[in-house]
Amino acid sequence: DVKVTQSSRYLVKRTGEKVFLECVQDMDHENMFWYRQDPGLGLRLIYFSYDVKMKEKGDIPEGYSVSREKKERFSLILESASTNQTSMYLCASTTGYEQYFGPGTRLTVT
Amino acid sequence: GEDVEQSLFLSVREGDSSVINCTYTDSSSTYLYWYKQEPGAGLQLLTYIFSNMDMKQDQRLTVLLNKKDKHLSLRIADTQTGDSAIYFCAETYGGYQKVTFGTGTKLQVIP
């Protein structure tokens, strides 16, 4: 079974803090994605990576950055967290037609 | 990404059929998907259809694709309480297996 794990299920941070969300997949997938999920808006793509050290902006990259130093690990970084980044963050990986998702991290910024 | 639209809520009685509808915009999509999200979990692929197909059936699930109208539907026969979840329609776009997701339809099954 493909497994995608995320470092935390719930996270509470203060405005202005630097936040790291980590995602690890165990299937040697080349492509990895970070989404945020908000009610009524569905999933929106923040960033994706198609290889180690390679990244591309998605639809809503502002306020975020990413890092992919190893194939299995894709990190999402909030340089200075703001309250409008309170959301559910989902990581996914794929090598074919199906995206495999992690369980999500619910981030609250106060 | 492209726009994928769905209604936000659907309520059905247990044992009835559920039909969840979706419209998409990218006529060049290769795959169209239905993902399911149960409470507190990530998304899981439920079924998919190639863009050159009109229909796909998989046990209680039937997917219908109308390419002319860019309309995709998911029918769940004999809906059970365990089918209560959010269902996302999605289409491929661009390269690198990127996918655009719809807003999700929350299915409530009434016992």
Image (cartoon, rainbow, N blue to C red):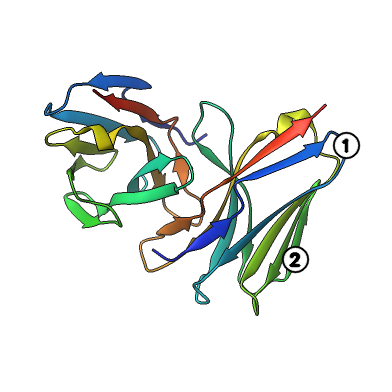
Mark 2 Cα shell of 10 Å, populated few (<14), some (14-19), many (≥20): some
Q: Do labels 2 and 1 share a chain?
A: yes
Q: Residue B89 vs residue A58: left or right?
A: right
User: According to the image, label 1 marks what residue?
Assistant: B15
Q: Where does the image place residue A24, in percent across and percent down from the top left?
A: 32, 33
Residue positioned 55% across, 64% down in the render: B31
In this rendering, the label closer to the viewer, 2 or 1: 1
Q: Which mark is residue B55?
A: 2
Give the structural element (helix, strand or loop) at label 1: loop
Q: Quadrant of the C terminus of chain B?
A: top right
Front residue (pair A80, A34): A80
Residue B40 vertical position relative to residue A31 in the rendered view, above or below? above
Identify the residue shown where x is 21% and y is 54%: A55
Q: What residue type is labelled 1?
A: Gly
- Is B100 placed above or below B50 here? above
Q: Provide residue B53's location: percent of width, then percent of height.
A: 69, 71
Quadrant housing residue A91: top left
Relative to A25, B62 lies left or right: right
